[in-house]
Amino acid sequence: MSDPSGQGMGASVARREDRRFLLGKGRYTDDIRLPDQTWAVFVRSPYASAKIRSINAAPALAAPGVLAVLTGEDVAADGLGGIPCGWQIKNKDDSVMVEPPHPALALGKVRHAGDPVVMVIAATKAQAKDAAQLVEVDYDPLPAVAHLKAAVSPGAPLVWDEAAGNVCFDWHLGDSAATEAEFAGAAHVTAIDLTNNRVAPNAIEPRAANGHYETSDDRYTLYTTSQNPHLIRLLLGAFSLKVPEHRLRVVAPDVGGGFGSKIFHYAEEFLVLWASKRVGRPVKWTSERSEAFLSDAHGRDHLTHAELALDADGKFRGLRVRTLANMGAYLSTFAPAIPTYLHATLLSGPYVIPAIYAEVKAIFTNTVPVDAVRGAGRPEATYLLERLVDKAARELGIDRVEIRRKNLIRTDQFPYQTPVALQYDIGDYQATLDMALEAIDYPHFADRKAASAARGKLRGFGISTYIEACGIAPSALVGALGARAGLYEAASVRVHPTGSVTVFTGTHSHGQGHETTFAQLVVEKLGVPFDSVEIVHGDTDRIPFGMGTYGSRSAAVGGSAMYKAMDKIIEKGKKVAAHLLEANVADIEFSDGKFRVAGTDREKSFGDIAFAAYVPHNYPIETVEPGLEDSAFYDPKNFTFPGGCHAVEVEVDPETGVVEVVDVSIADDVGVVINPMIVDGQAHGGLAHGIGQALYEECVYDDDGQLLSGSFMSYCMPRAADLPMFKVGNHVTACTHNPVGIKGVGEVGAIGVPPAVINAVLDALAPLGVEHIDMPATPQKVWQAIRTAGGGAA
Amino acid sequence: MATITLQVNAKSHVVDVEPRTLLVELLREQLRLTGAHVGCDTSQCGACTVWVDGKSVKSCAMLAVEADGRAVTTIEGLAKDGTLHPMQQAFHTCHGLQCGFCTPGMVMCATELVQRNPNPSEHEVRHWLEGNLCRCTGYHNIVKAVLTAAETMRTETTTGGAP
């Protein structure tokens, strides 16, 4: 390994992508305007459930600039437009889940407010908007159901006739009998009922798609706000547009944040391509924010009953969990996997729990589809477990730090097989617990609580010790569990004749800084200068293949693919070097960017070898091909398991119910760190996201399925003044099964911090007799909880 | 259509706009200055922030015709001769941006703060940025960047450099 420049592994290199963004020269999808550009606007259903009696497009078609007004019937007439689901879950009885159709434009019926019904295309955006107002859709409103409890009530309106009781699937994991036995022998059982609030992803860049069909070469190009352009091409090719991949190009240029919402294949991506061929011009659609609230997949929305069985001394014996998970009206790309394999498998947390049994029922409702949002299933698991652990500690009179310490998996227990399928390879949960407690100065919490009390504030301390599973894999396993895709990653490394390097990665960067961190990996591995490395992502015509960026997988899986490809480069380079240095290949070592005959000072630089490979005058041409370029696909052997401890202090104003987060101290083990500055930044963002879920954010539906929090006026996003500076610590145990040792960092904040915040709020309110609160702990909810408990002023 | 005359980044433009055209639409669609972004439709996110006569304005909340006769500065006009403004430089150094989408609005808004208040406290920075949403950074490094830039700008003012 080598790093002559100080810009390799472990260096806080400032990001090379920053300059274009800071100068206003980023190239986001909506910035792209193609020759003869047209604009699309969607007419969306105002009802959560309704029959479409008729659509009168004539007035819109007659409006200035209008090129086409398209409906679900037009899509169906072409035999296209089914938006596929990428994961099939099996029921307890081994039958498969109910998988209803998902037409790109509604056919006969609308199933959620915001369901797209008509697509209007015009020469300007304003003309398309004006014409959309003229489309007459005659609806016959039907009873709708938006909330989980209502959807599973007897006689509830059915979202899909084929889904009795609105159940999409009824799934379970773990050993029911073994769990019952642990409960039967337990000294104490703690039970809890929880809501995991529905959230909107809200990347600040709204989704956009620009489709271009070129008659000259019978080829489609899609510019789209995607986290995984190859996956979108695959789904377009195989399912929605049904065009072979060689005639499809998907470009995800600069993308303004994803947080999961830009993983999925959305109807609009298919529709702009399909419509482009019909109108013979490129068609662009850019979501407005209010439209985003009604069309981007939401996250979470669980109702859970959970019970923890303990010995009298606080040792965990068993865990039982029953969860209802809202799927919305249609199955989004990865929706079925989120409350199952990304949720129930995490229920052991960082603890030894001898037996676990989880049951998950997925429920259709007349709401926007629900899928992955930052953390995706893992925040839900962590939240219920950490709330339960705190409640058990209170009930048993055990200190909440001590009950965790008593049950954490010890370092000598790795690899640790949980009762819910996962095998953790490595971690040090005691170390991260100690780090976080020290950084927040836990021993002096009582002093701070007294100081807050003197100012009329209730101070609370909250903690969570959590585990995450990243880099979901291996492909064979996820395939057996119902995934309809592989979850490997690909990379190509092209060494140019003068020794500079272009890496093509199948992951996608939309804020993560891959152009910098992946270049650092190349510097580390090949010993070339940082400035001679280019990272290319986001274009299916340039990059051979890839599965994209989600689940904190890019560095762990994509970085490992790059390492494998670079190993091939080095192996070939050694053969060329052996020839030039007149030595045996076995004697050639590579380090610091030099190929060297072991034990001598005879060496060739990386650049010399690259040049020789492309100008093969003196070259082992009989055994080695010219050129220096190679690719690798890396299929992980296991998930990676970041973990750690998040500690939070809050101050509650008992008069107003306002919760202020006054201190956040976290210690994460995310594996080997490429760029500490970027890793800390990822943690910061996740923390804000998690605090947002805990205190502010919620998609609120009324009983008729109308989204009441459908804009930034009514959906509360965390703002700068709502948050403190974060104390972020890292404790590294290297992942044992990937070549880079990386685990992943993108989601840890959103996973670990919500229960720590709520545990802190409940700690603050405990003296007033408040025992429970659901997220988001808004001032109104906190104030009401205080009044209901009889505390506070009348 | 109305004909308006305005300065954008010190360059004069005479443009025809519809009465309903928003300033951000004029900038992005007609003048093709795509640095100002649209992140919402209720003037909450601040991604479209530009200066009009030196003051921060959400360009989605102002009609283009209202900019008639006025001077607009966008993120594209902040750097001088390719040299980043101290605020831009501080965002880079402090990792105050990730996806970059909120960044132009953040930088414009924060720069006006420091021009008005050369030595803002962390509390003042956080409250000044209440009209700008970021989903990536948790604001931590944005706040650090603004405080860092303020220090640089104070030093440059004292030593006679450009603000």
Image (cartoon, coloured by chain):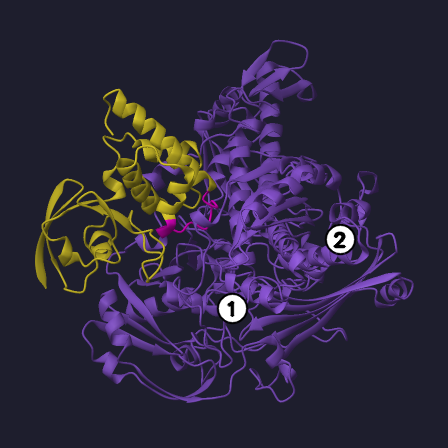
Query: Residue A325: percent from the left, percent from the top?
Result: 63, 70
What is the quadrant of residue B150 in the picture? top left
Q: Nearer the viewer, residue A703 or A565?
A: A703
The numbered dot on residue A239 is: 1
Residue type at numbered disc 1:
Phe
Query: What tint does the image give chain A?
Result: purple
Q: Which chain is depicted yellow?
A: B
Residue type at numbered disc 2:
Leu
Is B137 a magenta residue?
yes
Q: Residues within 10 Å of mark 2 (few under 14, many from 20)?
A: some
Is A556 a magenta residue?
no
- The answer for which chain carries disc 2 is A
Residues drawn in magenta: B130-139
Q: Is residue A600 above or below residue A38?
A: above
In primary-sequence order, the first of circles 1 and 2 is: 1
The numbered dot on residue A422 is: 2
Q: Secondary structure at mark 1?
A: helix
Q: Residues within 10 Å of mark 1 (few under 14, many from 20)?
A: some
Specify whether A91 is left or right of B117: right
